[in-house]
Image (tube, rainbow, N blue to C red):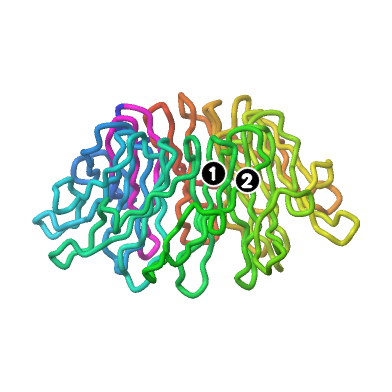
Amino acid sequence: VLEGHIYDVNGVIALPSADGQLPVLVSWSDDKTIRVWHPADDGTGAMRYTADTASCKVLEGHTGDVNGVIALPSADSQLPVLVSWSRDRTIRVWHAADDGTGAMRYTADSASCEVLEGYIYNVNGVIALPSADGQLPILVSWSRDRTIRVWHAADDGTGAMRYTADSASCEVLEGHTTWVNGVIALPSADGQLPVLVSWSDDKTIRVWHAAYDGTGAMRYTADSASCEVLEGHIYNVWGVIALPSADGQLPVLVSWSRDNTIRVWHAADDGTGAMRYTEDSASCEVLKGHTSGVEGVIALPSADGQLPVLVSWSWDNTIRVWHAADDGSGAVWYTADRVSCEVLEGHIYNVRGVIALPSADGQLPVLVSWSIDKTVRVWHAADDGTGAMRYTADRDSCEVLEGHTDDVEGVIALPSADSQLPVLVSWSWDRTIRVWHPVDDGT
């Protein structure tokens, strides 16, 4: 149990580690701080995390709740650049530097930490676009101020690459009419700027295509030729994922909403030879079954290019597992019938999230869910008696992990050196982080 944060823990990420060691963990909190946890020998030869000052670095600087952190890809084995965002309306970019002892550490001094300003309300999220040749990537951020910002790193005059809010280096994308809840980048071919997909409390999804701005530079704009607006949800859109696509085509999008539904958007020719998303019934499936707002969806890895299994979770306390099936016309679609959609019950309050653990040989993976009921559940697929693999809530197939004393807000799985179950890391509004190591149950 890792203690140190004095208010709710909002998230944890694991930094890439070498040679199978426990990775460095980065956590963030409503206490306005970020903590960097380095594993150390506990005296018995086992590697453990502790909150002592030598093993846990506290990053201070934000003046409001820290909403998130990402790590930028690192060109070598050094600690990566961290990017954090906050309710204080800023983004911070943390560069690790030698602390004078030869160890690399993060600090809040001006040489090591850039502060990106410009937003007038909370920053809700940041993603990094893939970059070439080890350069700092383009950052895309979004906010409650209804805008998306695209940050290009530029030479600061000393030869160092930095992010700035000037108009040449930061594009402001306007169009949403209320809070922007998220952005994803679709895979891009040939080094071009990727298509961006954003979603909002204004009930819409926007698809942003980069185009030449007249100076030869590629930019995003809100004009109708470059930005599609997808309508159909009748309440706030809470998320979108893109399913893997073949041969560079626009992928299938899956969105979910407070309106209790999931929508599956297939790109189709718009009549001019361009592929676009539309809400017509031939191109957009509406998945109904949840009886309250849908909190999230993940796609399980799929073999042979078929539509993957989808896993959704909701305020209705349930998880649904959607299997695509032939609709009788040769087309493969998702449906809510009992054969194609499993309903997993067991949590007694809102399900906050689900992850899938890596699986071998194409089998259904182990699922891990968490809830405001203070528990984590581990779901193992088992033969349902007909030869089909299904998830169930019976004691042999579903483990309940108890220990947190308040809402569980997230779980990640640390990479495992072998094929055994990985270490799980959970965090909670009880201000703690728990690290769960699998052990032999005696059977």
Residue at figure coordinates x 62%, y 49% from the top left: 366
Would you call the spot at circle 2 few (<14 residues within 10 Å), some (14-19), or many (20 or more)? many
Q: Are marks 1 and 2 in contact (CB under 8 Å)?
A: yes
Task: Answer left or right for 15 relative to 210.
Answer: left
Measure the alpha-carbon separation of dots 1 and 2. Answer: 9 Å
In the rendered image, the quadrant that contains the N terminus is top left
For this orientation, the residue located farthest to the front is 214
Looking at the image, residue 140 lies above or below residue 179: below
Identify the amino acid type marked 1: Trp
Residue range of the region highlighted in magenta in the rendering: 7-35
Look at the picture and state if 29 lies above or below 438.
above
Q: Residue at x 33, y 52 (%)?
A: 24
Which mark sits nearer the N-terminus, 1 or 2? 1
Q: Which residue is mark 1?
A: 199
Place of residue 149 in the rendered image (x, y in percent of width and height, measured from the top left): 38, 49
Q: Position of residue 278 (x, y in %)?
A: 69, 52
State yes or no: residue 14 in magenta. yes
Decide whether residue 280 is among the magenta residues: no
> Which is more toward the observer, 270 or 135?
270
Query: Where residue 103 sits: x, y (%)?
Result: 17, 57
- Left or right for 12, reference 328: left
- SS of the residue at dot 2? strand
Please name the amino acid that badge 2 sits on.
Ser
**Which residue is more in the foreground, 25 or 117?**
117
Inspect this view and state whether residue 192 appears: yes
Which label is found at residue 218? none
Label 1 neighbour load within 10 Å: few <14, some 14-19, many 20+: many
The numbered disc on residue 255 is 2
| Residue 387 picture location, percent across and down | 83, 54
